[in-house]
């Protein structure tokens, strides 16, 4: 964080996903808490995952392609 945000204004956004709340991750966050500000989110909020929206839009767009792509390069 200090390399990317040398001005000390970096923020870590914790989404509380299961891998991010493991003992190892939690210990690391505690040990490095002075390196960045910690922005807390509610635990595992389903409505804040934009990946699902992007995935749906991408699939919808790909389904409209005619003729459908036959090779990875066409895709």
Image (cartoon, rainbow, N blue to C red):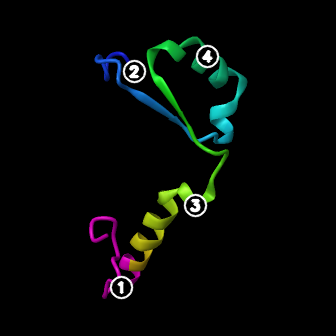
Label 1: state its secondary structure. helix
- Does residue 65 lie above or below 58 as drawn? below
Q: Residues within 10 Å of mark 2 (few under 14, many from 20)?
A: some
Instruction: Judge whether residue 64 is colored magenta.
Output: yes
Label 3: state its secondary structure. helix
* Tag nearer the camera, 1 or 2: 2
Instruction: Judge whether residue 67 is colored magenta.
Output: yes
The residue where tag 2 is placed is: 1
* Tag nearer the camera, 3 or 1: 3
The residue where tag 4 is placed is: 30
Label 2: state its secondary structure. loop
In the rendering, which numbered label is found on residue 64? 1
Q: Gap between marks 1 and 4, in whole Å?
A: 48 Å
- Does residue 74 lie above or below 6 as drawn? below
Q: Position of residue 11 (x, y in %)?
A: 43, 29
Q: Position of residue 54 (x, y in %)?
A: 43, 64
Magenta extent: 61-75
Residue at 61 percent of width and 16 percent of height: 30
Q: Gap between marks 1 and 2, in whole Å?
A: 42 Å
In the image, 64: left or right of 26?
Answer: left
The residue where tag 3 is placed is: 47
Label 4: state its secondary structure. helix
Q: Gap between marks 4 and 3, in whole Å?
A: 27 Å
- Does residue 69 lie above or below 22 as drawn? below
Q: Gap between marks 3 and 2, in whole Å?
A: 27 Å
Sequence order check, earlier mark of 4 and 3: 4
């Amino acid at each position: 964080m200090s390399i990317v945000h040398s001005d000390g204004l970096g923020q870590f956004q914790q989404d509380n996903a299961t891998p991010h709340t493991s003992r190892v991750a939690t210990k690391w966050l505690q040990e490095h808490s002075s390196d960045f500000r910690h922005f807390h989110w509610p635990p595992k909020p389903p409505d804040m995952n934009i990946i699902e929206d992007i995935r749906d839009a991408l699939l919808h767009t790909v389904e409209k392609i005619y003729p459908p792509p036959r090779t990875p390069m066409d895709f």
